[in-house]
Image: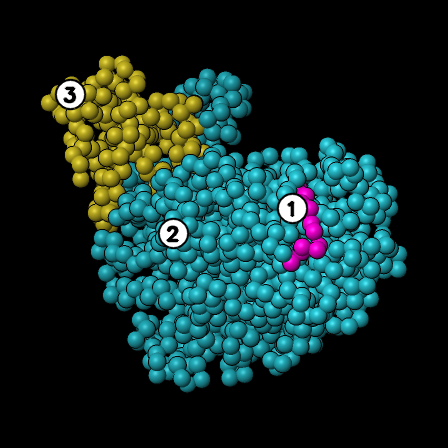
Chain colours: A cyan, B yellow
Amino acid sequence: MNPGDPKPGAVARWQDVERLLEAALTRRVDERVAFLAEACAGDELVRCEVESLLAQEAGASGFMSTPAVAMEGAMRENGAGWFVGQRLGSYQIQSLLGAGGMGEVYRAHDSRLGRDVAIKILPRSFASDPERVTRLEREARLLASLNHPNIGAIYGLENIGETPALVLELVDGVTLSERLEPATRAGALPLSVSAALTIAKQIADALDAAHEARIVHRDLKPSNIKITSAGVVKVLDFGLAKVTTDEASGVNGSYAPAAAADGTRAGTILGTPAYMSPEQARGQAVDKRADIWAFGCVLFEMLAGKQAYGALDTAADAAASIPMREPDWRALPPNTPTAIRTLLRRCLHQNRARRLADISDARLEIDDALTVPPLDTRTPPAALAKEKRPWIAWSGWVAVAVTLLALGVNFMRQQPSAVPLWGQFEIPLPTTARLPVDANFSLSPDGAWLVYFAVGSDGVTRLWVQAARDALLAARPLPGTEGSFGTAPFWSPDSHYLVFQSQGRLKKIDLLGSPAERLCDVSGTVLGGSWNRHGVIIFGTDTSGIWRVSAEGGVPTALTVVDRARGERVNAFPTFLPDGRHFLYSRISSVADQDSAVYVGSLDTKPEAQAVHRLTASLFGAAFVPAPDSSVGELLILRGSTLMAQPFDTGRLALTGEAVPVAEQVGRTKGTGYFAASSDGLIYRRAPDQAARLTWFDRQGHVVGTEGEPFIADSGPRLSPTGERAAIGLFADHNIDLWISEFTRGLSRLTSGPGLKEAPVWSPDGRDIAFASSRTGHFDLYKKGSNGEGVDEPVFASDENKTPSSWSRDGRFLLFSSESAKTKRDLWILPMQGDAKDRQPFAFLRTDAVETAGAFSPDMQAVAYASDESGAFEIYVRSFTPASAAGSAPAGPRRLVSKGGGIRLHWRSDGKELFYLALDGRMTAVDVTVHPVLHFGVPRVLFTLPVNGPWDVDAAGQRFLLAIPMDPGTPRPFTVVRHWQEQR
Amino acid sequence: MAAPPTRGVTVLLQAWSDGDETALERLLPLVEAELRRLARAYMRRERKGHTLQATALVNEVFLRLTDARGLRWEDRAHFIGISARLMRRVLVDHARSRDYQKRGGGALMVSLDDARLVAPAAALDVVALDEALDAFASVDARKSRVVELRFFGGLTVEETAEVLHVSPDTVKRDWRLAKLWLRRELQREAR
């Protein structure tokens, strides 16, 4: 029956029942049946009811005889849960989480720090037992020496009343035993092989950290292992753990046999029989190999769905029975990799001298098995389908394999047909949420968590958190982050808090889940941010530069000023450097890609003076990954879609080495790349299929043809003078090189070797191509035969980055832009004929504004270019006089050609029309007449380019050529590269 | 510790006795907080062989919270009546938190393998009794109230009679029948 929900008539019937019951109770027991038979007069329901109540009479005397308060008090005398509801110091004890002989663990709220914690207190009966107290304190010290994402952390050791209490990280989730139990009971396999290995790997990571700190857990078992809802494994309960003494540590990793010092009673065997190594069961001294045994037991159980040695009640059982038994190896699923079977046998070797000696060896085996997954029959085929890897991955694979062989790692035993994915796996996007196209993600500083904005099935945008080291664990939304938006949230340095934007406010939220707190109001959209160890938060916005605010909240103050006069659109994506004073950030130009750059800022510099320390050109920001033992970390920058890593000295605040590619086909959004990295993992999302195809458009914007096979473009096509070929930049061998598309006849390679290559410019006879290459650390000018023969011939080198843009029709002059700290980007002209000594460049136009994209008119009487001198980029034309080229003022007065802004221009080959791209991507044409005077018509919009990329126009000005991406859309999963720094 | 709000409780109690139902809403939290605090102290002090006097507890709360000089004698009955209900809530909460652990629910932090050290099963499932009592209240409100006052409030037969304005014999009879009904209900539930 449903309490509190009486059937109609129940009360009236109860009055009958009560009356009869009272009457029956006054009678002797043997008279009652007859009395009721008569009194109920055929109402069987009432009779049954009264009889069932009378039947309670015999046992009722003791029932409720002890008042509840006394009963509860008596239970508490023996039981746990004593402290529930109490306030101990700043901790409000909320509920009992668990209890055992080693202590009671409560969930509590720390009102001082506003977070939930777990508190471990000795059972009252042991509170005054000095041995127990010592053991608890020892556990605290052990835990304090272990700082690892897979080990439940300690926050403090506090005296509460008269007893010590451990304040611990609250780990919500299920224990591994709870996870395994339902399937195990049903006789099913509880986990897929890859899921089991993913969990095992994290356990091994935790043990490795403990063993490194000379700590043996001694009680590893599924009920001491928790898996959070986000999928992170945490090894808990170091209550039995033991630290080695210095004397013993040198001896083959074994520990002092005298157990008294560690608080363990002599002669007492501690641990859990089913997971206890033979030596532990016999009461012998144990070392880390006991943990390796237990690890083997746990791994076996995860894979096989049954305990390796069955249920053992006592240590004596274990000591007696284990030597006689073997685990049931046939219980392992058939798709268990051979290497893992071997690993299990080595972990579960009776003789510890022959047992696996070091848990890190287990990690390596598991890593291997995970990255070359076996055919998993219980994984849907879709999850197994391997992405078709570009050939680039193959070359990377070979390089990695060679490195490993050089290190003596036996690595080639894997099937040669396996997909080359060493150290790399994919984390799928959540199936129940949609990532907005412009949403990026960020990685916690400890490398454990991914976070991003996503729209759940309820249509609400929240932050979603996902384990970064585990592909199998589902992402989960973070409550309290409803209505958040922006590019990506960012992290506190301890990885505990997230900062995000919601409803015009910057907020922080505890990852463990207390309500979000407001930090400050913001206008516009927050574009990236960073939080240093000193509690300073900096963030960028799309309206007003970089701001600074306290991590405790407050009124933000400006750190940078957006220099709109220089064409800057935003200052954004700040990242603190390790000193916590300097930070990297992007100054993003609204028009010229090459003007967007990463700068070094400082908390100690005035906003107006920040734009001094330009580090490197970058359109998509940069990420810095510090090195643990060095001031030289790695700067990650996206070039095109290649992610490059370059050493960065945080002492000198300078780039020190050469940039090398670490990932290809990396996607990007709104000024940031889809990448993040920590010292142990690099995570990126590939762009929607990067393959592009050269596509012709007519003047109305209709596609009128395509050329050749798709390729991964970096820089767009530059048509040869005859229009039969095009030079393009594309990715090859981890680099960006120039290739020649012969259209239907395919691609041929133009350049190779170190340095990025860009900006191809054809000589008027089509025989040579001038280009820029960064092989010296900055972009210098080179030329090479367009048939690919010969070497790259340097034509001009200087300390500035230079970009060639036009070769005069008579072949005598090359127009290029050159960066200058003082006058920004200027137009220069390099003579291309005559003796080398005569070929000194001269400035064509050098003003305080940016001048770029210069193009000689076909008759060489004028130069068209883009400049931001008015505040926005516009197209201008100035006359050019070759005769006076070397003179003091080669450029004549300027003429404004565009209307409402323009960039990226080309002349028609007869010089009668000039094309440029308006700032919104509209292809615009301007008529040019030379006689009687030079005259420019009114700009006419032809069509809007589908993508904003480099383009060219044919000689007749009728067809426009662009590289158009094949696939505009499918969202890509996260690609994780473990230990990426070692893979190069 | 801050002094208990004696003045406020007295006024609220009087107002409630005079028929102001909103006074009760404000009164309950004040009394409950004090009850919880004292109940814990009582239970902690309790040792085997001692029987805990819930009435003493309620009395102490009453004395701490009210300014006895300003109260009519029937206000005390009212107070004890609501205190018993609050005690029920306090005790059921405690039992619930303990049972929660017993059933292994929620976020289990430490191993329960050596649960031998944990208390043996309770003689009576207080949480189940609380639920059965709710059901019983819809069948027979007064008998349910008698149980609440006696079992949770720890009141004697005479005190219960005083609070409910009935004779002690009625309380005894109600108590006897209620026990049968509730015990049967608990057994049903256990099956």
Q: Secondary structure at mark 1?
A: strand
Asked whether residue A704 appears in the rendered view, the answer is yes
A393 in relation to A9, above or below:
below
Instruction: Judge the density around disc 3: few (<14), some (14-19), many (≥20) Cα neighbours within 10 Å.
Output: some
Asked whether residue A495 appears in the rendered view, the answer is no
Residue A540, horizontal then vertical, whole percent: 48, 45
Is residue A52 found left or right of A549 in the rendered image?
Answer: right
Q: Amino acid at mark 3?
A: Leu
Q: Amino acid at mark 1?
A: Gly
**Which chain letter matches label 1?**
A
Whether label 3 touches label 2, CB < 8 Å: no
Is residue A455 found left or right of B42 in the rendered image?
Answer: right
Residue A313, horizontal then vertical, whole percent: 47, 67
In this view of the protein, which residue sits in the foreground, A190 or A895? A895
Of badges 3 and 1, nearer the viewer stands 1
Question: At 55% across and 58% down in the image, what residue appears?
Answer: A616
Location of mark 2 (residue): A605
Q: Per the image, is A397 magenta?
A: no
The part of the image, by quadrant, that contains residue B86 is top left
Question: At 44% across and 68% down in the image, what residue appears?
Answer: A631
Q: Which residues are magenta?
A: A875-886
Location of mark 3 (residue): B71
